[in-house]
Structures are given as structure tokens and as C-alpha cells.
Image (spheres, helix red, strand yellow):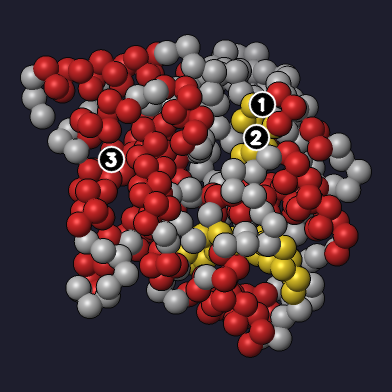
Amino acid sequence: MAGPGRDRVVKLLRQLEHAACRCPAHSNTFHQGSPLTCTVRKTDYAFEMASSNIRYGGGVSREIGMDLQNLRARNVCLMTDRNLFHLPPVKAVLESLVKSGVNYKVYDNVRVEPTDTSFKDAISFAKMHSFDVFVAVGGGSVIDTCKAANLYACHPDADFLDFVNAPIGKGKPVTGTLKPLIAVPTTAGTGSETTGVAIFDYEPLKAKTGIASRAIRPTLGIVDPDHTLSMPERVAANSGFDVLCHALESYTALPYHKRAPCPSNPINRPAYQGSNPISDVWSRHALNVVAKYMKRKETIPLLPLSINGEAVERVTSFKFLWTSIHQSLSCELITSLIISKCHQRIYFLLQVKQFRISTRP
């Protein structure tokens, strides 16, 4: 795309990068840890990438029972939601657990778009049964809820707001050791299986916030592309928009070397660190993938495998794989709801099909 169309998109990117936005990725207001700062410089000079281990492959969910055996798990908490409980992804995981003789209990009361109330209910369940391993089978809501349950079950004396991001919570660092958590995503847009972030709605203030700490990151993400075949059409479409929003969010985030304050100790470097040369590569690639496959999803059904197995693989599992990789390297994660509230930039979606970002404006 050339001429006025490209100029409008470049202008939009510049506005996003320099806008006075208070979300974690686009401002320097989010910081977790010690208030002590570097005495040499005001802004940071480094970024750090941290991610869960990822295992990818069609049908790989069948291995989870053996993973739990290898962890010597004796009492496993499996979290999902009531709709997913009756669908193939959960059935595949449960069959693997039964085959391997793993003792487990199911919590299926996860709320889509979690709240502090739904988090607390899951936390109470986890505290009640003293689990030694957690398994989350579902989308971002399920995985985030499981992260919170694991965190507070391992810190039974903590107040709920202790680990919630400031200014709503106290933003205290997580000092204790958590139990292993295996995440089995069933959608292709969240990337929650790779991050140390759990997002929820804080009902008393009607605000969306979360918990951000490397400590809550899943131990292992089992990415099984077969699970995308059971996604409802609306969920599949929403996953595509989720991918688009994550790519935009990462690419237009405040650069890591402009984030303040500079930490006095690397342990105080927050989970949100800003855009960087590595995440930029994946963000630009992500926009190209969305532009190519998002519309194709509308014309190539996912369920009839008789079309062409390879075509279905490209539409589903490739998108699934790059989402996990992109979120692993990105250092940036925020939900599409926050993004829409922050920017209201639906216009960009109309341009991205034709526009290929070649350099950062």
C-alpha cells in the first residue's frame, strides 16, 4: 500500500507509540517490586525474555498423563469451564490421566472473563484440597484462573490484593515457590500458556487489572493443534482478533530503553518491559500472518478434514504455534478488551490486509 493510505497507517502507529496511554505496555507507570532505582540512569537499558517450555504437535495432549507421572503427582487439580468439560480437549486430557493412573479432581466453574469473585472461588477450591500439580485446559480465562489458584494456594496467608497490580492492589513480589502448572490451551489467540500474567475484572471498582509475575508462569504449555478443530466459529474468529491485538500491542509498545524507572537489581525488572528488536520481528510477522489467514478462515472450513489436511494445518496449527512463540518472545501481553478501551483503533484492521510493515516508523 502506498500514498495516502500508508501515510495514515504510519501516522496512526506514531500516535499509538507516543499517546499518553496508561495501560502497562504503553506507559512507564507499571512497575512491580522494590521502589529503589538505578542511580546511574533514569531509563532501563536491557530486556529479558522468559517463557514456559512449549511442546507442540497434533495429539500431544495424550502425553500429559505421563508428564504427571514424571512429576510424581499424587493429587492433581484440573481446571476448565463447564462448556469445555464436554468437548474433545478435556476428554483427551482426562483419558490420558486415567490411563496413567493419576488421581485428580476437576474444577469446572471457571468464569469466562474472570472476576475477583470467580478467582476467589477457584482459590478456595485449591486451598481445600492441597493439590501438588495444577492442569489448566481451556482458553485464557481458564489458564489465568488456574495461575491465580496456584499462587494463592501456595501463599495461604496472603490477602487477595497483595499480589494484584498497583494501584488497585499492593503489587507485592511473589517470594514463595509455586506448584507445577501444565497449561493446555484450546484457543489460538491468548498465549497465556507462556506468560506470567493473570487478568481479571475487579468488580468493586469495575476495573480490569491482573497479577504479573514470572513466578506464576506455567511450567509447561502443551500446544495441541487438534483442539482448534472443536472451537466454535465465534471463538475461532475472536482468537484471530486476539492475535491481531497482541501483535499491535507489542509493536507499538513503549521501547524497553525508554521505560522508567531503571531497576537497581535485575530481579526488580517487571514482566512488562517494552518493545524490543526480537518482539518487533515477530510482531511484524504476526500482522502478515493475520492479513493472510484471517480472511482465509472465512472461506476454508476448519472441521471438514476432507478438504486438504495440509490446508487445515496451515489455517489452524500454524496460527496456534506462532501465537505461543510470539507471546514467548514478546514481553508484552494485554487482553483485547483493554486494547480496545485504550485505543479504539478498529480503523487499523481495515488497513492491515494490504499494509505490510517494513520498518518501525
Residue at mark 1: 206
* Mark 1, other Cα within 10 Å: few <14 / some 14–19 / many ≥20: few
Q: Name the spot of residue 327 as percent of width and height, x first.
A: 45, 46
Image side of residue 208 versus residue 307, left or right: right
Residue type highlighted by circle 2 = Asp
> What residue is rendered at 66% in x and 54% in y?
110
Q: Which residue is mark 3?
A: 287
Sequence-wise first label, 1 or 3: 1
The residue beneath circle 2 is 201
Q: Tell me the CA gap for discs 2 and 3.
A: 28 Å
- Decide if residue 92 is in sight here: yes
Which residue is pictured at 55% across the width and 26% down the height?
Answer: 24
Q: Are marks 1 and 2 in contact (CB under 8 Å)?
A: yes
Q: Position of residue 218 (x, y in %)?
A: 62, 55
SS for callout 2: strand
Which quadrant would residue 22 be assigned to in this image? top right
Vertical side of 62 occupied by 150: above or below: above
Say what amino acid the circle numbered 3 marks: Leu
**Label 1 to label 2, Cα distance in Å?**
7 Å
User: Pointers 2 and 3 in contact (CB under 8 A)?
Assistant: no
Residue 42 lies, in percent from the top left, at 57, 13
